[in-house]
Image (spheres, helix red, strand yellow):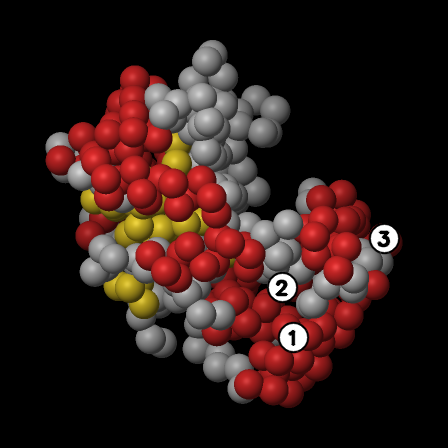
Amino acid sequence: MQKRRLGKTGVEVAPLALGGNVFGWTADESASFQLLDAFVDKGFSLVDTADVYSRWIPGHIGGESETVIGKWLKNGKRSQIILATKVGIDMGDGKKGLSATYIRRAVEDSLRRLQTDYIDLYQAHRDDPDTPLEETLGAFTELIRAGKVRAIGASNYTGARLAEALRVSQENGLATYETLQPEYNLYDRFTFEGDLESVCRKNGLGVISYYSLASGFLTGKYRSEADLSKSQRGQTVKKYLTPRGTRILEALDQVAQKKNASPTQVALAWLMARPGITAPIASATNLKQLDDLIHAASLELDQPSIDLLTEASSPDTQSESRAAD
């Protein structure tokens, strides 16, 4: 398993990140602890979460995932993980955005929940067009100088806005985004593969893709509308039940059979083989699922297999490609 550099930080990570969105939600505290222990024990380190996880659940207020991770960190394994969290999405009561005042408040809340005195990678969860980039990046710079944050990243930025942020950092001597976290997988390709990919590669940003398995569709679990009742994500997955989605699953099955692997492993291995991808993010709710994810890191796809998957996931029409952009 070859490690990869996380942007320009010099930090090296295994080519898979564990998504913390399920912690305190579909994985309770005990299951989350088991997953984190197993992930680290297998030599992996990058754990990604956000302050807002899992506010979308009735009765949750946000911070549930960070709180679970914080309790787990009492085991003394803080130095063994690269801890990434995010700020910016609405937490209620006006707590949102990327103003300097809010970032200073939000980071203290995250540090308290995580029970740590530093965050390895602090990410702007969503662009805030109402706040000047100079203000946002200035606040992040203060946190790095104070030792509360080691590096910063962006998520859900457009290519133009990301390029502008990098320029603002350079021109003003401010901390610069080291990573991008975009939605990217075999089905949802075209937004990232437009100008975002070129900006990242030109500037040496690490890329940590989310929805790497398209909400579970690329595992092969959902092949018809009858399968949508198999989990809470059924209605989210429905949009992938298209002729193109079927074509992608058939290609995944073909490569999986050839490589004696699972569709999950093949879908992640395709991402890992993409130039510039540092580590796709994937979540698990039990150890069997985690083992499936982990094996993807050692699966090397030959060029014909990569080409087959890339062609199968190409847009059906030019209009589809433009719509995805």
Q: Position of residue 51 (x, y in %)?
A: 41, 32
Foreground tag (2 vs 3): 2
Q: Quadrant of residue 37?
A: bottom left
- Amino acid type indicated by mark 1: Leu
What's the residue at 75%, 55% (across, down)? 320
What's the residue at 18%, 30% (across, down)? 142
Would you say residue 45 is visible in this rendering? no
Q: Please give left or right for residue 226 compared with residue 314 in the image.
A: right
What's the residue at 31%, 43% (across, down)? 167
- Amino acid type indicated by mark 3: Glu
Residue identified by numbered label 1: 309
Image marks 2 and 1: residues in contact by CB distance under 8 Å: yes
Q: Position of residue 149 (x, y in %)?
A: 22, 39
Q: Residues within 10 Å of mark 1 (few under 14, many from 20)?
A: many
- Amino acid type indicated by mark 2: Leu
Q: CA distance from mark 3 to mark 1?
A: 23 Å
Q: Which mark is residue 225?
A: 3
Foreground tag (3 vs 1): 1
Q: Among all residues in the image, which is located at the extreme left?
A: 146
The secondary element bearing badge 3 is classed as: helix
Q: Residues within 10 Å of mark 2 (few under 14, many from 20)?
A: many
Return the residue nearer the eye: 201 or 4.
201
